[in-house]
Structure formats: C-alpha cells, structure tokens
C-alpha cells in the first residue's frame, strides 16, 4: 500500500487542499480515490490591532508555507519520497471579511476578518436597499461601511477579495473566486451563477453618488463553479508556496472556496434537500434549498453550494460551552467524593442519563447563552436554568434540557425554513464535538428538526479534506459528471455512517420544550438588562 501511494505521489496524481481556519491552517493530501494520505498544520491566532481583528500578510504567507512544509515532511516520513509534483491544488478559508488592493497590488488597509462586527449600520442599510438579508460580516457590508465612514483608501480600490481569493491570486495571478465564497461577498443569483444584477446596479448608484471611480463588478473577483479550471501555479507562486524550490510549477488550481462550501463537500451535503449541522462551541445548520425563500429573514443567511445551489444558513453563537460548564461542575463533585472519572466518561454518563429524561424535559428550561445570540435577539451572554415548583427536577431532565438548549436557537432559525417556508429536508449530516457520544446528540438533533440525522466517520476530516476533494474533482471527473454524482460514487460510496430517524415522541417533546424556550426569551433579555 505504501509503495503504491509513493508511486502516485511521485507521478503527481494526488490532490492537495489547504484551509485557513481561525486558529489553524491545515493541509490534506489525498490519493486518486480521495483518501487522505498525508497532512500538516500550522497554528496561528488573529490579532486585535487598532480596534480591528486581523491577520498580517506575513502571517498568511509564512503560515501557508509552514503548513505546506509540514505536509511535505509528512509525505517524506511516511512514504520516503519528496513532494515535487501535485495533480491539483485548492485553497479554502473562513468566509467573508475585507481585503482591498490598489492598482499596484498593494493592500490598502489591514485585512478585516469576518469576526469584526463594526459594519452593522451598512448591513442594515443594504438589507433594506436589496430586500435581501446582508449580514455585517459579509464583504459588501465592510466595503459600504468604509464608504459611510468616509475612509480615504476607498477611492484607490482596484480589487476586493477574501482570504483564499487573495492566496489564489498570489499563487496563480488569477482574480477568481468559487461561487460559494462569492455568495458571502455579495448576493449571488443561483440562476445565472453570477452576482445579482439588479443589486449590483443599486450599489453602483451609491458609488456614483459618492463620486467613486469604479463600478462594483469591476473590483470583485470573477465567479467560478466547482470543476472549472481556475488557473495554474506560476513559477513565482511555486517559490512562494515552497521556498525550498522543490515544488514544480504548472499545477492546476480549482476555484478557491469558503469553509462553508468545503464543509458541505466533506459531509456530502450539497444535493438539494440535504444539509449539515456543525455542533461545537457554536452551531450552524446549512440546508440546500430547492428555490428562493419568499422573503428575507435576519435569522437566515443565504449562500450557495460550490456548484451554485442556494443554501439557507442558520448560525448560532452558542452550543456546547454551557453544557461543558455543567459537566465540569459534576466532575468537581466526583473529585470531592474521591472518584476519578475521565472527562470522556463523564460526558458519556451524563449524556446517556439524559436519554432517561421526560420527552419535554419535565418542564425544565435552559438557555445556553454564554455569549450574545442574534437569532433570538439576546444581546449579551446570560446562561439561565429555569423551572417552576411543579417541574420534575432530576439529573436526567436537567441534562436533557441542556442538550435541548444546545439546539434551541438553531431550531428557531430552522423552523422558519422548515415550517414557515415549507422547505423540504430529506437528511442532515451532523459533525462536531456534540456528536462524540454515541447517538444522544444525534437523536436530539433529529427531534429538533424532525428529519433523519447521519453521522459519518469521515466528517472529522474537515474542510481541508473537502477542499482536496474539490481539487481532485477538477482533474479526475468524467465528462458531464456532476459534483453531486462524484461525491456519491467516488468519495462516499461504502463509507461507514449511522443514521437515526426522528422518534415521534421525541419530536413532540422537543416542540413542548421549544414553546417554553421561545416564551421565556423575555426573561433572558431582562437578565441582560438587570444582571
């Protein structure tokens, strides 16, 4: 097996995906069957400078180089060969943010990441102008806020892109972006696979009023869909990526994509009526829609899959942090009693105990808001645990209420799509820390959204693997083969996974909990005001 892989590496048929996450840059090399064969990573942290969350250009380049070097070292250590040729490369990163350059290719202001929340005024005005929900983290909101602020650099903008768009440009010379990432810069029309034409016109009117010397479409990157040839690694780019001079230039690049798109690929959830839920410190759901929603909702962001289908995204700031606090509390009690329980076992014990609780949690209600929660309009973190004198207060119901709460805000947003909009959902793939304990979190999510939930072993490979798959799709797809078919037949066929269908009693119980949860939100808002 190792000899076969070594031959594939030396012949240059493997694909590489690199993803810039918020705390780690990860690279995954896959073979011609999309199996991970080597990896490397680089830890990094954003900086808070002059009121802005940012990463410097030096951080970006040196972090990428270190990630590639460690991946190449992993190849050498495992297979005894040097990584000189690569079949295809793709770059991904956390979406949105603001990177603008002048005609000479110089960065005009420090990179403003998605984490900056200083474009709320612009986001609200654009939402009203377009009749389309524009979150404050989107690139267009950052640009308009800079215009509203009268920032001097705006008149010199010749190109605006995102983090992976910048890296792609640096290594290939091409100013392009994958459609999924583009949809987090500016609204995309899923019919034309281009930026929304009438919204472009509306924004161009703003630019004219402000006497700015460009049209928006002239400074945005060109949109590409999965499978399109997005350029080649230049000689200069090869030396940037690999300063040792070992890597050969000319490698094909697939369109750079956002972390939402690579997550969809890594969980095989890009078909219409499918979706995925990532549940960790925060939680988000992405559901691939069959068409446009009837109206704009502040709770739902609209992006697209890497092939351009519309996706409804509900992102919530809070998921497991409050549960972690309770588990730690029980761990302290166990230690006080002289019992040493490993953390993983403590989680399993408490999660399995939750299964014994009443379906509606016995009247107990929990709010896991360690930080603010925009979906339910709670402006600061105030975790609450509420019960009446008649509630059935026991350990099983307590843990069940906290697990329900982990999906509470998410259910509020998903119910808009599933109930008010009638969006149809055949299956959801769950991934993230909440699903580590067998079946418990999975069955509770199934009850929350009333749809089957699948957890796959490969979901843990993450977005860098998803990006490597997109790179491999570029060079190994058959004529006319869609990405959906490619994933089904060439990536996930025969993969191990466990699917749990919603239990009707659990669904009914979660609905009762949800009524109390929504009804009690004024209590949480009052806590923010008074505590």
Image (cartoon, rainbow, N blue to C red):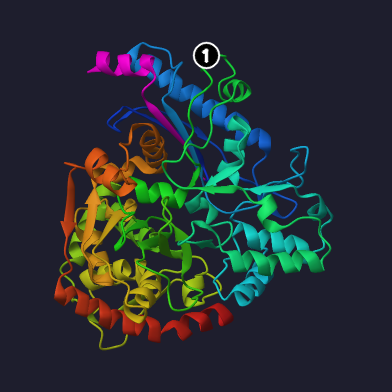
| Residue 475 horizontal/vertical position (percent) | 38, 31
Camera-side residue of 225 and 414: 225
Give coordinates of residue 354: x percent, y percent. 21, 66
Residue depicted at x 15% and y 75% = 504
Q: Is residue 116 visible?
A: no
Q: Nearer the viewer, residue 402 or 207?
A: 207
Could you tell me which residue is drawn at 39 percent across and 40 percent down?
470
In the image, the segment drawn in magenta is 1-21
Q: Which residue is mark 1?
A: 246
Q: Residue at x 55, y 78 (%)?
A: 528
Binning the other alpha carbons within 10 Å of mark 1 as few (below 14), some (14 to 19) or many (20 upward) gives few
Quarter of the image with the C terminus in it: bottom right
**Residue 204 higher or lower than 299, as above or below:** above
List x then y, in percent, for residue 429: 28, 55
Residue closest to the far top = 80
Residue lying at the far front of the rendered structure: 479
Asked whether, in this view, residue 269 is left or right of residue 153, the answer is: left
User: Where, quadrant-wise, is the N terminus in this rendering?
Assistant: top left
**What element does badge 1 sit on?**
loop
Position of residue 343 measured from the top left corner of the image (x, y, whole percent): 30, 48
């Amino acid at each position: 097996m190792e000899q076969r892989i070594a031959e594939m590496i030396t012949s240059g048929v493997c694909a590489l995906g690199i993803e810039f996450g918020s705390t780690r840059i990860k690279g995954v090399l896959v073979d011609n069957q999309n199996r991970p064969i080597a990896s490397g990573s680089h830890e990094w942290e954003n900086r808070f400078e002059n009121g802005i969350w940012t990463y410097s250009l030096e951080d970006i380049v040196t972090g990428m180089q270190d990630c590639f070097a460690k991946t190449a070292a992993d190849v050498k250590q495992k297979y005894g060969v040097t990584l000189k040729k690569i079949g295809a490369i793709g770059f991904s990163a956390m979406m949105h943010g603001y990177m603008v350059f002048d005609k000479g290719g110089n960065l005009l202001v420090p990179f403003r990441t998605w984490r900056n929340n200083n474009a709320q005024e612009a986001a609200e005005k654009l939402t009203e102008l377009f009749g389309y929900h524009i979150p404050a983290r989107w690139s267009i909101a950052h640009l308009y806020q800079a215009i509203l602020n009268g920032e001097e650099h705006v008149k010199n903008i010749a190109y605006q892109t995102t983090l992976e768009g910048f890296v792609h440009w640096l290594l290939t010379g091409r100013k392009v972006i994958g459609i999924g990432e583009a949809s987090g810069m500016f609204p995309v029309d899923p019919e034309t696979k281009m930026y929304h034409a009438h919204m472009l016109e509306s924004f161009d009117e703003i630019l004219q009023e402000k006497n700015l010397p460009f049209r928006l479409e002239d400074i945005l990157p060109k949109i590409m869909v999965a499978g399109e040839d997005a350029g080649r690694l230049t000689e200069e780019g090869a030396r940037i990526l690999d300063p040792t001079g070992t890597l050969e230039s000319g490698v094909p690049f697939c369109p750079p994509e956002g972390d939402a798109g690579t997550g969809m690929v890594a969980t095989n959830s890009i078909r219409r009526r499918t979706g995925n839920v990532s549940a960790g410190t925060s939680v988000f759901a992405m559901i691939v829609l069959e068409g446009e929603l009837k109206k704009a909702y502040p709770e739902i962001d609209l992006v697209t899959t890497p092939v351009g289908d519309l996706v409804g995204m509900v992102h919530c700031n809070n998921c497991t942090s409050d549960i972690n606090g309770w588990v730690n509390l029980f761990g302290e009690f166990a230690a006080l009693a002289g019992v040493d329980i490993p953390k993983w076992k403590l989680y399993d014990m408490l999660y399995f105990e939750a299964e014994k609780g009443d379906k509606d949690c016995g009247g107990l209600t929990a709010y896991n808001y360690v930080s603010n929660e925009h979906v339910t309009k709670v402006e600061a973190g105030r975790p609450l645990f509420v019960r009446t004198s008649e509630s059935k207060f026991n350990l099983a119901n307590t843990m069940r209420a906290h697990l329900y709460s982990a999906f509470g805000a998410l259910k509020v947003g998903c119910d808009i799509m599933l109930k008010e909009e009638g969006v149809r959902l055949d299956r959801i793939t769950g991934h993230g820390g909440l699903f580590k304990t067998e079946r418990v979190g999975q069955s509770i999510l199934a009850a929350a959204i009333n749809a089957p939930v699948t957890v796959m072993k490969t979901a843990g490979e993450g977005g860098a693997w998803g990006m490597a798959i997109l790179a491999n799709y570029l060079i190994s797809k058959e004529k006319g083969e869609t990405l959906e078919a490619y994933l089904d037949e060439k990536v996930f066929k025969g993969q191990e996974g466990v699917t749990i269908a919603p239990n009707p009693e659990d669904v009914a119980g979660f609905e009762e909990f949800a009524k109390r949860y929504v009804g009690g939100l004024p209590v949480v808002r009052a806590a923010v005001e008074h505590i």
